Image: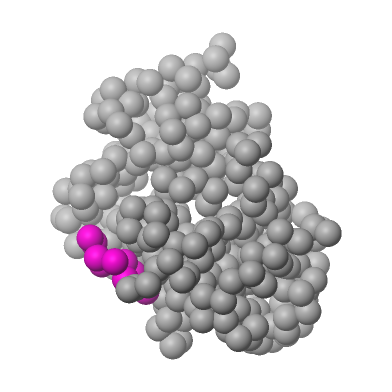
Amino acid sequence: MRFQPVKNFISGNDRFILTSHETPDGDAIGSEYAMYCALKILGKKVRIINADTMAFKYKFLDEDGVIETLEPGETPLENLAAWSLFILDTNDIHNIGEVADLILPKIREYFIIDHHEGSEEIVSRNHIEEDASSTCEVLFQLFEEMKIPLNFSMAQALYVGIVYDTGSFVYPKTTAKTFGIAKKLIEMGVNSNYIFARIYESNSISALMLQSKVLASLELVVDQHIAIQTMLKKTIEECDAMYEEADTIINIPLKSENIKVSIFFKENHQGILRCSMRSKGNIDVAAIAQSFGGGGHKTAAGFKSKYPLAEIKEKVLKKLQPYFE
Ligand SMILES: [Mn+2]
């Protein structure tokens, strides 16, 4: 009974808040929206509340505007003790922003559905499939097992999560099962070309300017095997862009064969410094992220830095050094 704990959590509660990680991506938004619809079909009361606003490109998924953003310092609901929390697409409760302080301590219980590497304790108490391409892939199978019929908007949301998290069906966790699910979603009427245009051809001009500035910050180190890009708060402001608009810039250096690791240091509007890492081959960036209190997958991970830029850069490079000796 693969999904039994999730099913128990759903049947044992009737009010759900859904949330996901900071700077929610396609898989976070897709899984929240699909889960929202599924729980509604089951007659539950549901709210989606994220710490950060979603990027504009995902708004087409949420036609009715049900995805809410937490107001800083404000408790969104009176009687939180009557609600339970689903955390989707992250198993790190420090990665859900202010939801961790304002909602999590007051709710009845919480449950995580995710596909990132997690500690044994977290994996045993929640539903985490480390081999799944995306949280949306996991949810598709959950809905199938629970015999929850998918409507078109749910199919589209799940497809977006899968496309986003597989880099359009090419990242390592893309399997025959992933394609099988995508096939079923396409058969339900999802238009892959339309989704491509929404996700990859709908950026703003400020996002383009931001990309050009960030790319100009490129440094190549360790025999040009490691690429480092930096985005400061002032870079975002100069371009009149949004932090979320930088989400795919990290992938650009990996297009060069010689680049084995791409590191992106980015500062948000509050000046919080985050380090994202992508790698090729056998380089485990999740382990490095974990050593700094973050997490992720072997080839895609990140963490929030407690150190200033110059210091954390040196520390991260030191951890990568053994792979290049
Ligand atoms: Mn994901």
Q: Position of residue 167 (x, y in %)?
A: 59, 56
Q: Is residue 69 left or right of residue 253?
A: left
Question: What secondary structure is the magenta-colored segment mainly?
Answer: loop
Viewer-nearest residue: 255 or 291 = 291
User: Is 229 placed left or right of 282 in the picture?
Assistant: left
Residue nearest the observer in this picture, 325 or 149: 149
> Does residue 153 appear anywhere in the picture?
no
**Which quarter of the figure has residue 282?**
top right
Q: Is residue 273 above or below residue 176?
A: above
- The residue drawn where x is 41% and y is 45% is 94
Q: Quadrant of residue 287?
A: top right
Q: Is residue 72 magenta?
A: yes
Q: Magenta segment range?
A: 68-76
- Residue 243 point in image, percent of width and height: 30, 56
Residue at 64%, 64% (x, y): give it: 9
Residue drawn 71% across the image and 59% down it:
5
Q: Position of residue 224 (x, y in %)?
A: 46, 26
| Residue 148 visible at all | yes
Across and down, in percent, residue 124 comes to 68, 44
Taking the spot 66% from the left edge, 44% from the top edge, the residue there is: 123
Q: Is residue 85 above or below residue 311?
A: below
Q: Nearer the viewer, residue 246 or 97?
A: 97
Question: In the rendered image of this protein, does residue 288 appear above or below residue 251?
Answer: above
Q: Depth check: 243 or 208 in front?
A: 243
Image quarter hosting the N terminus: bottom right
Q: Is residue 173 left or right of residue 73?
A: right
